[in-house]
Amino acid sequence: MLVKVVVLTGAGISAESGLATFRDADGLWQGHHVDDVATPEAFHRDPATVHRFYDDRRRELRSVVPNPAHLALARLEQVLGDELLVVTQNVDDLHERAGSRRVVHMHGELLSALCDSCQGRFAWDDDLGDAPACPGCGNDTLRPDVVWFGEMPYDLDVIERALVEADLFVAIGTSGAVYPAAGFVRMAALAGAKTLELNLDPSETSHLFDDARHGPAGKLVPEWVADVQALSR
Ligand code: APR
């Protein structure tokens, strides 16, 4: 039996690959102020600092690999095909490297650059801090293609349609602290979906889920995917 499944992932799914989350102890927001690196105002005020932060994050991607949780979601796509959509808040490319194809990056991607002049988006795996020319218009106005606080996430229309049609909504490795993603569980539930949280600890929105399992994603996600695979046979 195929079901329509929407999986929302957050930084917790990439933690076991070695990428820091935002709000855990030693998280990125412990060492940096959001207002210094993750707002359009910060970029306007001090582009060098903002570029350094994201250039470091982009370089870090070269030394990490997908973990069993990413790999399990890619296996799930083999079973469910178009009936699965992964919506990620993560700007890393670990879902894609694990083999997932139906992935929406609602907060943008480190491996993409956005031009403030022509609004073009370009695949990018190099630093941006040395003011490279935009491949579209030639201006030196490229910025990280990352959605900052105060900006509109990408593809909300696609996501909302999928949530309304979903039979099952699963949130993995996200604290439930940032909207609109934190509101997806309510939206899916109101439209009739069952909801499941897989997270290290209870998130801020844990109480809104029908079922919540707590532990590392590298263990919980493969277990859950195996259950779905067994039901789909
Ligand atoms: N397995 C499962 N969950 C984990 C693991 C793990 N190994 N390690 C940490 N977690 C959980 C934490 O318990 C926490 O609830 O992952 C969650 C990470 O929360 P955040 O750091 O807040 O990350 P996220 O929810 O993705 O943040 C949302 O905030 O700053 C912005 O744009 C940024 O996309 C990000 C958004």
Image (spheres, rainbow, N blue to C red):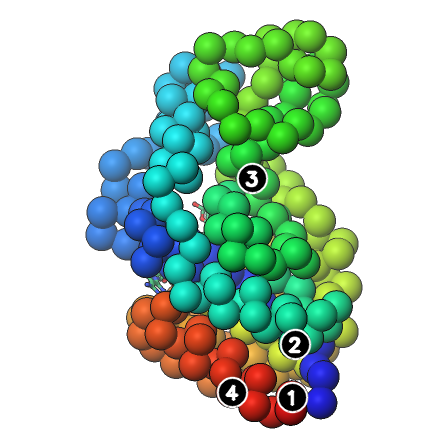
Q: Quadrant of the N terminus?
A: bottom right
| Mark found first going from the N terminus, 2 or 4 | 2
Near mark 4 (Cα within 10 A), the count class, few <14, some 14-19 or many ≥20, is few
Earlier residue among tags 1 and 3? 3
Task: Kindly identify the residue that appears in the image at 57 percent across and 27 percent down.
Answer: 124
Q: What residue did someone put label 4 on?
A: 227
56 relative to 5, above or below: above
Camera-side mark, 2 or 4: 2
Hey, what amino acid is under mark 3?
A: Glu
Q: Which badge, 1 or 2, comes first in the chain's sequence?
A: 2
Does residue 86 appear in this view?
Answer: yes
Which amino acid lies under the numbered mark 1 shown in the image of this protein?
Ser
Whole-angstrom CA distance, mark 2 to mark 3, is 26 Å
Disc 2: which residue: 79
Mark before the other along the chain sequence, 2 or 3? 2
Q: Residue at x 44, y 73 (%)?
A: 221
Q: Is residue 16 left or right of residue 43?
A: left
Label 4 to label 1, Cα distance in Å?
9 Å
Question: Image quadrant of ligand 1?
Answer: bottom left
> Which mark is nearer the camera, 2 or 3?
2
Residue at image mark 3? 109
Front position among marks 4 and 3: 4
Q: Is residue 166 above or below residue 156?
A: below
Q: Which percent across, then down, holds residue 24?
A: 28, 54
Q: Are marks 4 and 1 in contact (CB under 8 Å)?
A: no
Residue type marked 2: Val
Tell me how far mark 1 sits from mark 2, CA to CA. 8 Å
- Residue for point 75% across, 56% down: 158
> Nearer the N terminus, badge 4 or badge 3?
3
